[in-house]
Image: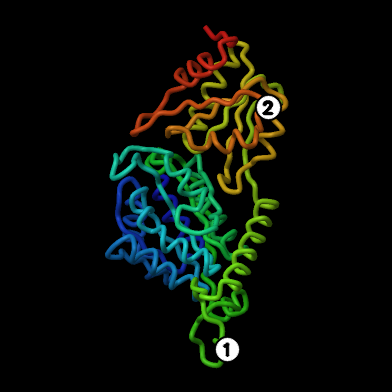
Amino acid sequence: MKGNEAIAHAAIRYGVDGYFGYPITPQSEVLETLEAEMPWETTGMVVLQAESEVAAINMVYGGASTGKAVMTSSSSPGVSLKQEGISYIAASELPALIVNVMRGGPGLGTIQPSQADYFQATKGGGHGDYHLIVLSPATVQEMADFVGLGLDLAFKYRTPAMILADGVVGQMMEKVVLPPFRPRRTDEEIALQCPWALTGKHGRDHHNVITSLEMDSVKMEHNNIRFQQTYKTIEENEVRYEEKFTEDADYLIVAFGSVARICLKAIEEAREKGIKIGLLRPITLWPFPFKEIARLSHRVKGILTVELNAGQMIEDVRLADEGHVPVYHFGRMGGMIPNPSEVIDALQSHFPEITIK
């Protein structure tokens, strides 16, 4: 099935209580699949096409405040519209899952694949000092797996999580093993697991109000300090990445999402000709694997980041490298997808000592 379809099926099986979305290419199959499966008749899951992206994210905000497992999905321009709501959810310390299947921009741009929302996802996107947990799938299997992982992490840390997928992974078809059905939690279980939730249940104490507003500057600073402590804990415990052929690599490629698959093919072709290149694929774009890249930078002669953008992740790679070796970028934009030979050409261009015939 398509990556977008896998997300929808995984949401049903994971026990998601509510999905609120709005169609936009190249992620519309998430909503379309949920509508076709009609989970409200089997699991009780609410599926609602909102009147706009702004309405959808605020429905997520409301659902999250009751302790329910809720999510939304969109693509780049639609996620831009959701940014204010995402910031509110983060400030209210609520768990939620946002899916962004990226397309080319800026503006309305193209409906073709892109990875140009890296800054938006990993640097906060909306206003204020906050972070999202950002998961980057490279396979249809990970599209399914990251629904459960994203919501589990969101509830663990009471913060929004995002699946940041590019349009290639959303639209391509692969075999996928769907997760087993997990029953939706009862109201009693939610009350036990989420004591902060506002359920309206008779007899519960509701003196605490869920809000992102704080007019007292001292209290607002205390809130932000608490947020930063949570983010530090996440950085210490939730970094995820994948390494390929790094044990003896002379050069390192850093790439995420579908581009990592293209780079892996380029690396395999280069190694057949005696050129030792390794791959590091960040799975969590935030928290970013700074320590892992720093470790590898002391063992290689140079690093190339490959992205479907003008060069965004390269900033984090350079921070990790700390100037130890040269770090260069190769990217395509506007929906253009590189092939393995272009990646090899970029390596040779930046590191002319590499000779691959």
Picture coordinates of residue 117, whole percent (x, y): 43, 44
Q: CA distance from mark 2 to mark 1?
A: 56 Å
Q: Earlier in the sequence, mark 2 or mark 1?
A: 1
Residue wearing tag 2: 324
In this view, the residue in front, 19 or 209, is 209
Three-letter amino acid code at the position of disc 1: Asp
- The residue depicted at 51 percent of the width and 76 percent of the height is 210
Q: Nearer the viewer, residue 183 or 51?
A: 51
Amino acid carrying label 2: it is His
Q: Is residue 322 visible?
A: yes
The colour mode here is: rainbow
Q: Residue at x 55, y 55 (%)?
A: 131
Q: Tell which residue pokes out farthest to the front in this image.
A: 217
Nearer to us in this view, 146 or 203 = 203
Count of all numbered marks drawn on residues in the image: 2
Q: Nearer the viewer, mark 2 or mark 1?
A: 2
At label 2, counting other C-alpha atoms closer than 10 Å, the crowd grade (few under 14, some 14-19, many 20 or more) is some
Q: Please name the residue shown 64% across and 17% down the image.
A: 276
**From the image, which quarter does the N terminus lie in?**
top left
Circle 1 residue: 205
Q: Quadrant of residue 84?
A: bottom left
Residue drawn 57% across the image and 15% down it: 351
Q: Is residue 354 above or below residue 73?
A: above
Estimate the x, y position of residue 22 in percent, counting from the top left. Answer: 31, 58
Identify the mark at residue 235; answer none if there is no mark: none
